[in-house]
Image (cartoon, rainbow, N blue to C red):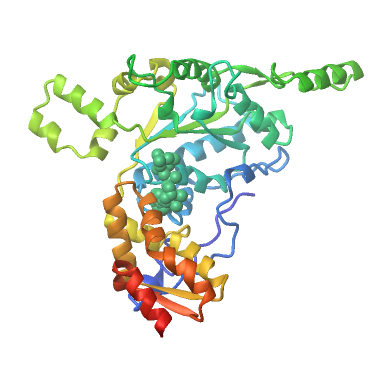
């Protein structure tokens, strides 16, 4: 059974890292929690039809996401509700109580780069008790001759379900980088196959029967034919996608301008439009804006639940380092401890790293860039030196070369 483990902080909130936030001089490493870490998406489809059971409620799912993802409350809410609804729908269907007119709540997540869109879905993956596949939209081509065929996504679900078609029919497909499917006006760059892929996805997202064996898979076709001759072929040679949930995400760079243009054309005062933040503009994106961006109305119409992720400010990035269980500082602690070196982080050092990352303007990805620059020489030199411990302060972040020299001299 999929269950959330109990939070260890006294407040019960996963972000309430007692000793860390109450201000010791040194930021103690966040103790790893004794449960399964965020499973990579490929590992998250362990359920079998015999074991399916799901008892989580949306707020519990959101609390689980809080452990890994800082901010993005609205996206967490939307994702938690969509996942729980999907599970309840699967449960009722399997209990012999199918809904007569069930409409899928496929989700579209959009927002600037590096703010946690992929991270959110990846973090939800270890709670997902149905088969789950993730793919980048850039992988596909219209015909499937050059890139993959979108139908392969559904066949991947069957593989994840260990061949159990019934399981796979209730799975979840996560399509990342979906904005790359947009077809822009001629000359704007994007090839025409984006539209073809959108059209192929339309059928999948609603209700399609997909052949279990790809028409391009000659070996598979032969094996199928032989199984049929032996009388061992599966009951059906297709899988239906009516109950598969789709989660789609992408940065949709430039969408703000599309929305701004529409608002201005609709007579909104330019002062008001100019005062809207990027997040507000993205939240205001409607079907017409997605169409102007280069999507087919039928494609975007099949993604009724839309939510914008906000950009991350310095405080958010500081919290990403300090509180997230997937914080980069864990990675650095691990890398140095492999050589017997203990690294400690002071709040001032983390804050400075967050400031540098903010100026990169690539969300939390900027933290990696900032850390890499600061720690490059430490990683190169310390493993061969006698240093067994060092502390990351604001001074060290501002002058890594000088601090390293001093450390080596000591
Ligand atoms: N809100 C957040 N909280 C904690 N960590 C985050 C957050 N946002 C991003 N990160 C970290 O930054 C990395 C990159 O984030 P992610 O892959 O989710 O970006 P994205 O929003 O999908 O961007 P893109 O549109 O470029 O794909 C994550 O692996 C994670 O470590
Ligand atoms: Mg992403």
Report if residue 53 is visible in the image. Answer: yes
Please tell me which residue lies in front, 196 or 374: 374
290 left or right of 269 in image: right
Percent position of residue 378, x then y? 44, 69
Would you place residue 210 above or below residue 281 in this image?
A: above
Q: How many marks?
A: 0
Percent position of residue 106, x then y? 47, 29
Percent position of residue 89, x then y? 56, 32
Would you place residue 112 above or below residue 358 in this image?
A: above
Please tell me which residue lies in front, 385 or 345: 385
Percent position of residue 216, x then y? 69, 18
Q: Quadrant of residue 67?
A: bottom left
Would you place residue 167 above or below residue 346 in this image?
A: above
Looking at this rendering, what residue extends furthest in the bottom direction?
410
Report if residue 284 is visible in the image. Answer: no
Would you place residue 219 above or below residue 279 in this image?
A: above
Q: Quadrant of residue 154?
A: top right
378 left or right of 231 in image: left
- Quadrant where the C terminus lies? bottom left
Please tell me which residue lies in front, 367 or 8: 367
Give the residue displayed 59% in from the left and 60% down from the top: 35
Give the residue displayed 42% in from the left and 27% down from the top: 180
């Amino acid at each position: 059974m999929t269950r959330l483990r109990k939070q260890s902080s006294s407040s019960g909130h996963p972000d309430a890292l007692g000793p860390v936030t109450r201000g010791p001089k040194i930021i103690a490493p966040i103790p790893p929690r004794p449960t399964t870490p965020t499973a990579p998406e490929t590992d998250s489809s362990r359920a079998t039809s015999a074991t399916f059971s799901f008892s989580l409620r949306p707020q519990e799912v959101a609390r689980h996401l809080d452990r890994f993802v800082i901010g993005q409350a609205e996206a967490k809410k939307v994702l938690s509700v969509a996942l729980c609804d999907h599970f309840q729908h699967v449960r009722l269907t399997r209990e012999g109580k199918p809904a007569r007119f069930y409409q899928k709540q496929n989700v579209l997540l959009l927002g600037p780069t590096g703010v946690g869109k992929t991270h959110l879905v990846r973090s939800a993956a270890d709670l997902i008790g149905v088969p789950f596949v993730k793919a980048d939209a850039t992988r596909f081509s219209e015909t499937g001759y050059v890139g993959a065929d979108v139908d392969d996504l559904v066949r991947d679900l069957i593989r994840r379900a260990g061949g159990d078609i019934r399981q796979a029919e209730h799975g979840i497909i996560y399509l990342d980088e979906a904005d790359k499917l947009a077809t822009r006006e001629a000359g704007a760059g994007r090839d025409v196959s984006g539209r073809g892929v959108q059209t192929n996805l339309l059928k999948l997202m609603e209700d399609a029967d997909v052949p279990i064996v790809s028409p391009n898979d000659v070996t598979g076709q032969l094996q199928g034919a032989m199984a049929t001759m032996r009388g061992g072929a599966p009951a059906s040679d297709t899988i239906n996608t009516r109950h598969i949930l789709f989660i789609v995400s992408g940065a949709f760079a430039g969408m703000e301008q599309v929305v701004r243009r529409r608002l201005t054309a609709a007579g909104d005062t330019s002062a008001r439009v100019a005062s809207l933040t990027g997040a507000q503009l993205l939240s205001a994106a409607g079907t017409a804006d997605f169409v102007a961006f280069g999507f087919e109305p039928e494609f975007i119409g099949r993604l009724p639940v839309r939510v914008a992720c906000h950009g991350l400010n310095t405080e958010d990035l500081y919290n990403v380092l300090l509180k997230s269980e997937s914080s980069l500082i864990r990675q650095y602690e691990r890398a140095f401890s492999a050589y017997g070196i203990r690294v400690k982080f002071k709040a001032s050092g983390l804050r400075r790293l967050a400031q540098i990352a903010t100026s990169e303007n690539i969300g939390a990805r900027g933290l990696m860039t900032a850390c890499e620059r600061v720690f490059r020489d430490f990683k190169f030199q310390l493993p061969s030196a006698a240093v067994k411990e060092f502390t990351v302060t604001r001074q060290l972040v501002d002058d890594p070369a000088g601090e390293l020299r001093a450390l080596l001299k000591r």
